[in-house]
């Protein structure tokens, strides 16, 4: 499996944060709220008996109905909050939760954890109402941990994205892996296109103005044609098209979602 060293490093960060923090905010992507739940974080939190809240971020990218269903599903296990760092969804609710938590102890530290690119740093900026943490569409932006004072006795810890021991391909489908770092970007884009075609085919039409085909490779070709991505001889540049689709997915430009 790829990157075991990276994984070990991140697991040790997760361990440290889980010892240091009193509460864990696990951030997930509202488009794929179940897939972006992180086993490493949840297992460590339960071992250490830390209270976990799941923050379903990027709620602006999904319809209300879907968001509600995702929340109900997750709340079977953990308290969950629908949130958008961009559109101010759920800020009041989360402010209230933090205020209540802050009464439990003299000083509380909330560890903000999750896969790369789910919006941990953006969430912190939104709560702080100021840009204190660096954000970027590029997964892996936040490197070290950063302690941010939110109020008199509440601290937030921004952390690098935690990945679990899984294939690059699966991480890329979660928007947590840079497409340029993939060995097989076309294969991954095909999987993504297939999933979108299965779950919400309209999203292909909305984003690229072409009808999806049953065969994802044909869809990819149509998209490449539409974008006019060509290599010499006029052949469609499939690899460039694949990377573009993966980036669009990372950037939230494709409105597909599933549980
Ligand atoms: N539409 C939408 N995009 C968001 C939201 N929150 C964050 N983003 C975008 O998602 C991307 C990643 O945001 P970050 O806050 O850097 O994510 P992170 O989890 O800190 O990422 P790493 O530090 O790389 O692990 C950026 O392009 C943000 O603009 C949101 O609520 N809605
Ligand atoms: Mg970050």
Image (cartoon, rainbow, N blue to C red):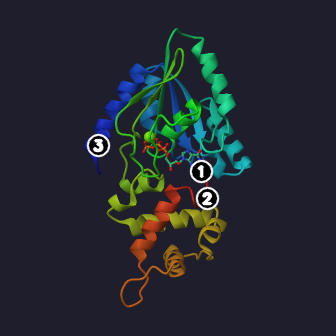
Task: Give the residue at mark 3.
Answer: 6
User: Which residue is outermost to the front?
Assistant: 130
On whether ligand 1 comes within 8 Å of the CB at mark 1, the answer is no
The tag on residue 31 is 1
Q: Position of residue 42 (x, y in %)?
A: 47, 32
Say if residue 191 shows up in the picture. Answer: no
Q: Position of residue 248 (x, y in %)?
A: 51, 62
Q: Is residue 214 above or below residue 59?
A: below
Element carrying mark 3: helix
The tag on residue 256 is 2
On whether ligand 1 comes within 8 Å of the CB at mark 3, the answer is no
Q: Is residue 231 above or below residue 27?
A: below
Q: Are marks 1 and 2 in contact (CB under 8 Å)?
A: yes
Please tell me which of labels 3 and 1 falls first in the chain. 3
Q: CA distance from mark 3 to mark 1?
A: 26 Å
Q: Is residue 67 above or below residue 108?
A: below
Q: Position of residue 143 (x, y in %)?
A: 35, 39
Q: Residue at x 57, y 60 (%)?
A: 253
């Amino acid at each position: 499996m790829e990157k075991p060293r990276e994984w070990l490093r991140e697991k040790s960060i997760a361990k440290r944060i889980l010892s240091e923090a009193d509460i864990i905010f696990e951030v997930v992507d509202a488009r794929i709220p179940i897939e972006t739940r992180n086993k490493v974080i949840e297992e460590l939190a339960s071992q250490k008996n830390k209270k976990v809240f799941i923050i379903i971020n990027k709620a602006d990218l999904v319809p209300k109905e879907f968001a509600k269903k995702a929340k109900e599903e997750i709340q079977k296990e953990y308290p969950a909050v629908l949130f958008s760092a961009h559109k101010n969804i759920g800020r009041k609710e989360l402010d209230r939760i933090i205020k209540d938590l802050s009464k439990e102890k003299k000083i509380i530290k909330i560890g903000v954890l999750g896969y790369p690119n789910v919006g941990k740093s953006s969430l912190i900026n939104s709560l702080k109402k100021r840009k204190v943490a660096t954000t970027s569409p590029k997964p892996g932006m936040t490197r070290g941990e950063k302690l941010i004072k939110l109020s008199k006795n509440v601290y937030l810890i921004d952390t690098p994205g935690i990945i679990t021991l899984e294939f690059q391909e699966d991480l890329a489908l979660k928007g947590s892996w840079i497409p340029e770092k993939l060995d097989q970007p076309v294969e991954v884009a095909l999987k993504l296109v297939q999933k979108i075609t299965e779950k919400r085919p309209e999203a292909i039409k909305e984003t690229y103005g072409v009808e999806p085909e049953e065969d994802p490779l044909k869809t990819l070709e149509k998209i490449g044609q539409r974008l006019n991505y060509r290599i010499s001889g006029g052949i469609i540049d499939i690899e460039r098209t694949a990377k573009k689709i993966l980036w669009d997915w990372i950037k939230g430009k494709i409105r597909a979602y599933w549980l």
